[in-house]
Image: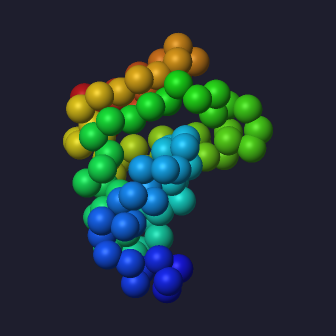
Amino acid sequence: MKQLLDLPDEMILAIINRVKPQLLLLCSLIGTRNNRLERIVLERSHSLDLTFDYYKSPYEAFMKRFYAYVMPCIYDNIQFLAFNLQHLTDISTFAQAHCG
């Protein structure tokens, strides 16, 4: 982690942009208590793609973490959201709990 933190923000952004699916990156970096990395990731969370089949193992745990910890940190920043219908119930539940 130290070597990553030594890089300039632009280089970290280039690495972040290569990680697919990006939800895994969000789940891995938000909540790490590294303010710099969290800030960089949060600033880039305007567009969110949930079309990957996250409900297959091993991603199901990431989805639980995403809705419990990540989504509350980023939902104000989201300008575009693409998702499969299988996410509709979780998104609706989250919206009712946090945006209502």
The residue drawn where x is 38% and y is 78% is 7
Judged left or right of residue 66, residue 75 is left
Residue at point 63%, 33% (across, down): 54
Q: Looking at the image, which residue sits at the far right?
A: 57
Question: Residue 38 at what x, y percent from top left?
Answer: 35, 65
Task: Tell me the quarter of the picture where residue 99 sits.
Answer: top left
Of residues 98 and 78, the one drawn nearer to the viewer in this rendering: 78
Image quarter in which the C terminus is found: top left
Q: Looking at the picture, how far across and down is residue 18, in whole percent?
A: 49, 50
Q: Nearer the viewer, residue 57 or 89?
A: 57
Please identify the quarter of the rendering in which residue 95 is found: top left
Tell me if residue 19 comes above or below residue 38 in the rendering.
above
Q: Is residue 53 left or right of residue 28?
A: right
Coordinates of residue 25 in the picture (x, y in percent): 51, 53
Rendering coords of residue 15 (x, y %): 45, 60
Q: Viewed as shown, does residue 33 lie left or right of 100? A: right
> How many numbered marks appear?
0
Q: Is residue 47 left or right of residue 29?
A: left
Q: Is residue 66 visible?
A: no
Please give the name of the residue rendered at 47% of the width and 22% of the height, measured from the top-left corner.
Answer: 83
Q: Residue at x 73, y 32 (%)?
A: 56
